[in-house]
Image (cartoon, rainbow, N blue to C red):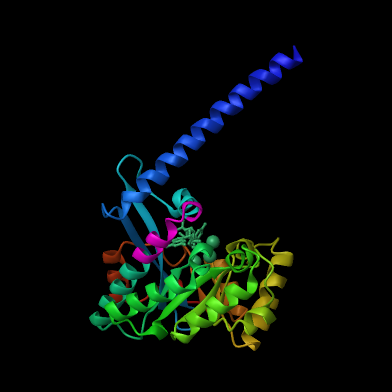
Amino acid sequence: RAKRRGGMRHEIFDAQMRERLVDRLRIENELRTAVERDELRLEYQPIVGLRAARIVGVEALVRWQHPRLGLIGPDRFVDIAEESGLIRTVGAWVLRHAAAQAAAWRGDGHGPPLELAVNLSARQLSRPDALVETVTDALRDSGLPPGLLALEITESALVDDGDEEAAEAALARLRALGVRLVLDDFGTGYASLAQLKRLRFDAIKVDRSFVASLGRADEGEDALLVAAIIHMATALGLTVVAEGVESPRQLRRLSALRCAQGQGYHFARPLEPGMLRELLAADPPAAWSTS
Ligand code: C2E
Ligand code: MG
Ligand code: MG
Ligand code: MG
């Protein structure tokens, strides 16, 4: 009997596995043509300077207007793109389009220079020749000054393939283009601030899991950690961006800790280009201010 039950569990398991595999293969297949069919979209989320309560940059976040599934987020397809190697095509599309968009906003003549942040994947870093060419092309064709492009890299992307030296060499070549390097989701991996300084990162984004409890009665250790990170990173000359700022309390707390920049739903969700343009043209909402 036990055997039969086990067998049945197996069948259920197999069926679910098969379904997931089919789903995956299907998405992978469709992704191959998504770029040609112009189905990828970019949304832009503001990054806010906390002192002046002003937008200092935007992060480009990819979406897919899928013919069957509707608008889907990167969590549904970026991993698949990574594993299949399609991420290079997707990544090149993102860089080209985001750079063109940022250059267009620049042409609008909105206040201080707006920095554009673009996410890179491990797979892109592992082919530095192709990546350097992609970034160079995107900058040249858009006319966006290299100093206004920030490339976001996660800690795991730095060490995933085990070849830290290769990743380091790739970073050096990117730096030589004049772009900024940002460590994404800081705190979720194993990078030390000293290491980041050596790799010549310009900024870190503190993962939202550390920001979540800030300003709550139970903030405890997280607040100590965030305070220490901000303190050390700032002393090392790294700009600190807090991710996932969702409440006025978190904002006030971060501001008191002298965190330089913040990003999150409290300020704005990722927006379509037209909406972001309106936000750039308007005065900053009072809720962004802490004084
Ligand atoms: P990320 O780079 O850490 O981007 C921040 C993610 O947090 C975004 O999710 C954003 O919508 C979400 N977020 C922003 N503010 C808040 C908040 O206050 N609360 C919460 N709960 N979430 C917030 P999204 O757009 O789903 O992107 C997920 C991840 O997918 C990104 O994390 C990034 O690692 C990856 N990704 C996005 N676009 C690209 C891309 O063009 N290329 C590559 N390689 N990866 C990308
Ligand atoms: Mg990012
Ligand atoms: Mg992040
Ligand atoms: Mg993240």
In this rendering, would 131 be left or right of 145?
right
Displayed quadrant of residue 38: bottom left
Magenta range: 82-93
Above-or-below relation of 153 to 50 = above
Does residue 265 lie above or below 195 as drawn? above
Q: Residue at x 39, y 75 (%)?
A: 133
Picture quadrant where residue 26 is located = top left
Residue 246 visible in image: no
Is 112 or 83 nearer to us in this picture? 83
Q: Quadrant of the N terminus?
A: top right
Viewer-closest of 255 and 160: 160
107 horizontally vs 3: left or right: left
Residue 47 vertical placement versus 37 (above, below): below
Q: How many labels were placed on the picture? A: 0
Looking at the picture, how far across and down is residue 18, in whole percent?
52, 31
Q: In the image shown, does 289 or 146 lie closer to the viewer?
A: 146
Query: Farthest residue toward the top?
Result: 1
What residue is rendered at 27% in x and 54% in y? Answer: 36
Q: Position of residue 80 (x, y in %)?
A: 48, 50
Residue 245 falls within the magenta-colored stretch: no
**Can residue 83 be found in the magenta stretch?**
yes
Q: Residue at x 37, y 79 (%)?
A: 136
Vertical arrangement, residue 202 with respect to residue 38, above or below: below
Q: Position of residue 236 (x, y in %)?
A: 64, 87
- The prevailing secondary structure element of the residues shown in magenta is helix
Please provide percent x and percent y for residue 206: 59, 70
Residue 6 shows in the view? yes
